[in-house]
Image (cartoon, rainbow, N blue to C red):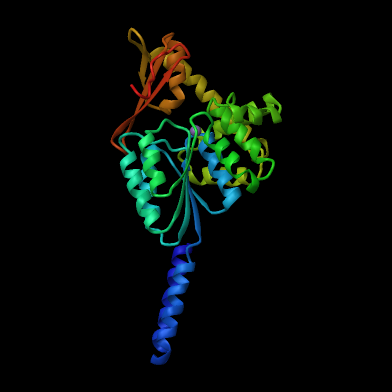
Amino acid sequence: MVISKNKIGKKIAAKKVTKKIAAKKVTKKIAAKNVTKTEKTKVICISHKEDCDGISSAALIRQAFGGDSILVDYPGQMEALNQVVLDKKLKSLFICDLGLSEKTQDEFIDILSRLRKNNVSVTYIDHHDIDPNVIIALEKIKVKVIHDINECTTVQVYHAYKSKLNDHASFVATCAAITDYMEDRPIGSKLLQIYDRQFALISATVMTYNIVGHQREPDYLQYLVEELADSKFPHDIPNTYEFAQIQVEKLSQIIAKVKKGMKLMSNLGYMEILDSGASGAVNFVMGLSGKDVGVAYKERIDHGIYAVSVRGSKDCKVHLVEL
Ligand SMILES: [Mn+2]
């Protein structure tokens, strides 16, 4: 919408110039140049759409800096980055809760270099394992990197931009920490202490079920970002608890399916998932297999790949991501 409006505006302006007397053309052109320079006003946050940490990061960035969110999963991450590179109005870009791999990191650095050449300010905030050379490369091109494997992304966003956020933002960050299993970390645990534990747990859980259950409804996920940015509690967003109940019922059906369809190897349990998310089923595969590792995989026909979810128990001594 904004782009087409501005396009029209520019076209009209250009026509005006040609209609005016030739002598005036020079000064008008200079003015037009200045306009395009100051038009860089857009703030965009690209964040992970599949869990509470990604959605909450986008919400806190929105509260602190305004702008729009682009919510993506891992397969859609590069596509979104390649799209924003083309946006001439982009002033600053935040990338949240999207970990990098050997497969994606070079392209990531490449796209961010192009953004920096276009004078876009870029901030990358994440907690997933990262090759230290990637951080060095990003800092070299003056990307602001906020990276701590010990706190979830939303807690890091909260910590970095606290002065631009309201009191409720600490609750949004607490819920994100819970869903990422990181509410026992130095900052995360202090945030949880502000709130009643049970209240935070049910809020985080209801939020998570609403996010997971609406993965194919981008408008709803955007709505959640807006409501969280607007300091709403999950229970103040209509129908979230009812929706969570439906999700819980579906999960109980997955438990029954995993019990039937799971296969065992000597040190792990695995299962192909057909009619739910692999990441939603993997905990049951691990838990019900009695092994220390669970693997659930699902074909992503649209991307021609398999989404593989792996979960290790606390007794699993192998670093599964590295493996
Ligand atoms: Mn996260």
Q: Where on the picture, by quarter, is residue 104?
A: top left
Left or right: 151 as drawn, with respect to 105: right
Count of marks, rendered view: 0
What quarter of the picture does the C terminus occupy?
A: top left
Name the foreground residue: 234 vs 48. Answer: 48
Query: Residue 25 location, x and y as percent?
Result: 40, 86
- Is 246 situated above or below 257? below
- Is 122 situated above or below 196? below
- Is 321 situated above or below 28? above
Name the foreground residue: 124 vs 302. Answer: 124
- Identify the residue shown where x is 41% and y is 62%: 88
Residue 122 in sight in this render: yes
Residue 242 in sight in this render: no
Query: Residue 176 location, x and y as percent?
Result: 57, 33
Return the residue found at the far left: 304
Query: Residue 40 location, x and y as percent?
Result: 47, 63
- Identify the residue shown where x is 37% and y is 53%: 83
Name the foreground residue: 34 vs 90. Answer: 34
- Identify the residue shown where x is 37% and y is 33%: 131
Query: Residue 287 location, x and y as percent?
Result: 46, 13
- Is 41 situated above or below 147? below
Name the foreground residue: 32 vs 294. Answer: 32
